[in-house]
Image (cartoon, rainbow, N blue to C red):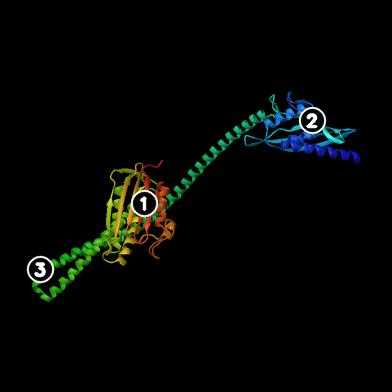
Amino acid sequence: MTNSSTVEAEVLSVFHKFWDAYKQRNADAVFALCAPGVTFFGTGAHEKAQGLDEFRKLVALDFTQMPTPFSSEFLWTRAITQATTCWVEAEVILRLDIDGKCLELPKARTTVIFIQHNSQWLIGHIHGSFPSVDQVEGEAYPVEALKARNQELERIVANRTAELEQKARDLQEILKSLKETQNQLILSEKMASLGQLTAGIAHEIKNPMNFVNNFASLSADLVKELRDELEKDKTKLEPKTIAIVEDILKDLEQNVTKINEHGKRADSIVKGMLLHSRGKAGERQPSDINALLHEYINLAYHGLRAQDPSFNVKIVTEYDQSIGVISVVPQDLSRVFLNIVNNGCYSANEKKKTSGANFSPTISVYTKNLGDKVQIRIRDNGNGIPQKVLDKMFTPFFTTKPTGVGTGLGLSLSYDIITQGHKGEITIDTKDGEYAEFIITLPKQVS
């Protein structure tokens, strides 16, 4: 038993040395382990050798066809001894480098018969084959069959990959469409809620405002009647009394005129709020963007004048008349114009308070036809926006105004209206201490 085990270990050692030399393409080491009369039979009819010289030629052909080393994995190996003969059987997988790719050959089977020669075990016969692969005459390995199979697999994988990629793109488009629809629904709900709130406030303000305006007009008429009566009875009153009464009437007339003037301004703001809240959220209609912009610039200006009679700002406009009519939601877009112009007026007015009489607050508004798009630029010469907060300007509840002056919702809502509601863009160009310019780009048509 010990002798048999020793023999098996010896022939297995020779077997593995032979395979290692063969994988490394070391011809000298291969032939050193072969007996002079070594024979070989392979898969193809041409793969046979009788004697060492023919085996050298066969190995040379093999090394020429596959000059680079390859790797192998033995699935099983067994050695069998009998008297002075011993053989090793094995099943192995070969992995070849072909055209820069690692290709795995089907299972190969080999039987190697050893004989003793000069007191050492040498290889007397080799049989190796690929039972499951057709082999081209003259090939040492089934390379062409393997290449063909690999190309077919690559084609199948490429087709399947293309199908999966297309499905992934389709799913991305569906997901994008769903997100846009979701954002549109959220924005529509916001606009509807804001419209209802605006309409409710405007109606509540309109009734008392009507009383203010009506009674201001009646008071002005009463002052006129009182002055007429005073004129008739001048002779009955002392000159001093007449002078006092006329001064009072003059002051009263001025007060009533101012009340009426600002009441009408407030009424125009209320009318604007009501107009602002009309229409369904998301309802597109052909609109003259220049006229819409001009209307709400004036509304913003007069609204601020109503709040602060000392407020004044120069408004410069340059409208591109070639724009014509574009498809927008005017109720939504007007909110954007009102908000940006209000912010610009506030910034320019605040700068005037610290810059003195030489500073002239200015709001500049430009429109430009860009072919299939429209560009709107609203610029103020106020204090600008610090770079450190520029990225936060469209964040809900963020504001650069003092507490109680701004809510931080105007620009956030404006961003949603432009980007989600109109599929446009809104950016800011600013220089701290000098100016801020909001640049709005809108497509003329949205599919």
Q: Quadrant of the C terminus?
A: top left
* Residue identified by numbered label 3: 232
* Residue identified by numbered label 2: 126
Image position, residue 289 (x, y; %): 32, 47
Query: Which secondary structure, mark 2?
Result: strand
- Is any part of residue 13 visible from this angle? yes
Image position, residue 239 (x, y; %): 10, 75
Foreground residue among 328 and 230:
328
Q: Residue at x 51, y 42 (%)?
A: 172
Mark closer to the observer (1, 2) = 2
* Residue identified by numbered label 1: 439
What label does residue 85 carry, if any? Answer: none
Disc 2 residue crowd, few under 14, some 14–19, many 20+, Cα 10 Å:
many
Query: Which secondary structure, mark 1?
Result: strand
Task: Count the numbered circles shown.
Answer: 3
Q: Residue at x 17, y 68 (%)?
A: 250
Q: Quadrant of the N terminus?
A: top right
User: First in sequence: mark 1 or mark 2?
Assistant: 2
User: Does 27 sit left or right of 410 as displayed?
Assistant: right
Distance (Cα) linking label 1 and label 2: 83 Å
Image position, residue 19 (x, y; %): 76, 36
Mark closer to the observer (1, 3) = 1
Q: Against 347, is 15 above or below?
A: above
Distance (Cα) linking label 1 and label 3: 64 Å
Distance (Cα) linking label 3 and label 2: 145 Å
- Is any part of residue 41 visible from this angle? no
User: Does 117 sit left or right of 219 as displayed?
Assistant: right
Query: Which secondary structure, mark 3?
Result: helix
Q: Amino acid at mark 3?
A: Lys
Q: Amino acid at mark 1?
A: Ile
